[in-house]
Image (spheres, rainbow, N blue to C red):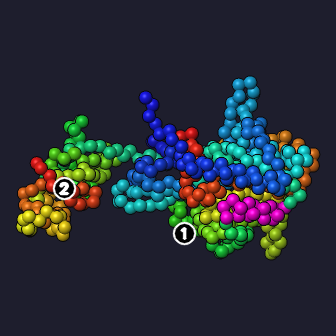
Amino acid sequence: MERVLWQPTAELETLKARAQFLQAIRDFFHQRNVFEVDTPLLCHGVATDPFLHAFSVHCAQLEHPRYLQTSPEYAMKRLVAAGSGPIYYLGKAFRKGEVGTLHNPEFTMLEWYRPHWDHLQLIKEVETLMQIMIGCPAAEIKTYHDIFAENYGINPHLATIAELQSIAIKEAWINSDDFSDLDRDGWLDLILTHGIEPTLGQNHPTVITDYPASQASLAKVRTINGPQPYQVAERFEFYLNGIELANGYHELACAIEQRQRFEQDLIKRKALGLSDLPIDHYLLSALSAGFPACAGVALGVDRLFMLKRQERNIAKVLPFAWKIA
Amino acid sequence: MATYSTNEFRSGLKIMQDGDPCTILENEFVKPGKGQAFNRTKFRNLKTGRVLERTFKSGDTVEAADVMDVEMQYLYHDGEHWHFMDPQSYEQHEINALVVSDAAKWLKEQDVCIVTLWNGAPLGVAPPNFVILKITETDPGLRGDTSGGGGKAATLETGAVVRVPLFLQIGESIKVDTRTGQYVSRAKE
């Protein structure tokens, strides 16, 4: 007789509440005339971000592998380019290697696109959704510059690697000779995750905007003028109780610049010793055909539901967490 | 050299840090959605007992520590060393006071303990969770008092001092929880 722990990682009562939660999200978008799209999960291309790892799936009849999507972004943008108007996706996304109390390699993502909106308009809508779903107060908006300046007195857009490194050593997160191969964004990520994130969104959601241009991903970039001008990405993140909940962009619409970013990602992937990935020509063709000004955001549904249920481990809101899936 | 990737990190895993064997106590995966992933770990240095924190880049590897817990029978104390025997191989180990540490006051000849070995050399000794020891010294106390309230100090045959109920007398054996140092019950021998 087989005897292993087979029972769900979430209480059945939690799963019933989860069903209502998903229904309430669908109601929210139905009322706003945003229609649901269930885009494909096994695609030719996938996000090229060096720190997102996609599962590749070998298909017997095909020469190249397909990739389980790390987010429905590319397919949804092709729909927007085709003139869909506002759309949302509520379903699974996959990220290899991400396991922890806030991470499950297979997770539920809510992603939506608002043609003709900018990221500031979309921030208001994310805020409204969160207030309806978990009853949190209004959000405060801070720039990426503000949170680093307030906590460590530096300008993250201009600080040198040596300055960032000295903060990490002073805080005793690392030894003085650790991470010699970490780049500038890596050091920023270290300080953000260790020193800043835990303090964000303590009583109300905190929205971080204007990320370093080097972390633009698929967002538009603009220049901040001053004695030392620098570029920022029109990208935002929502935090509540120190937990990152949503990531949004004022979307880059230029196919040429998008191609350059893909190519930069692939160079960085190669330097990190990561597998090569195809460039998604369907997306680039769709952008070339004419993509409207647009804002989009992806939200981690499991995490939002964790906050609603006051759970500290993502396993407690999933029918079967990764370990026993 | 055996290594572990951060993906394998879990509490209880034995790794080398700064030349010393350590055991992982906590491991937290942190990652900004699009950014670099890290493992924030808390571990205990098995030589010094100190608890340390350190961050690794996810995917990095660290040297594994060859640390094993082995059941061994405590034989005798020669005044300087404590002698143990592996009942499987009959191999004997003499262990110094620094390694035996607080376990010394619970060690009774013939008892089976857990000896932690690092590269084959003793690193620590854990006594059995429960030991039965004879009272060698205690105040006479009051006969007939079986309530267990109050209590008194009693010195045991190994030198440990525990609080026991008033009715217990010199020469009687008691069961003690070595993890808390507390009296559990009277024992018949």
Query: Would residue A3 be visible to someone looking at this image?
Result: yes
Image coords of residue B91 (percent x, y): 22, 39
Three-letter amino acid code of the residue under disc 2:
Ser
The one nearer the camera, A3 or A39, is A3
Q: In the rendered view, tell whether residue A1 sits above or below residue B172.
A: above
| Chain at numbered mark 1 | A
Q: Residues within 10 Å of mark 1 (few under 14, many from 20)?
A: few
**Which residue matches tag 1?**
A170
**Which residue matches tag 2?**
B185
Q: Is residue A133 left or right of residue B39?
A: right
Callout in the foreground (2, 1)? 2
Image coords of residue A106 (percent x, y): 64, 44
> Regarding mark 2 in the picture, which secondary structure is present there?
strand
Identify the residue at horizontal 12%, vertical 54% (top origin).
Answer: B173
| Number of the label disc, if any, that sits on residue A109 | none
Residue numbers of the magenta segment: A118-135
Three-letter amino acid code of the residue under disc 1:
Lys
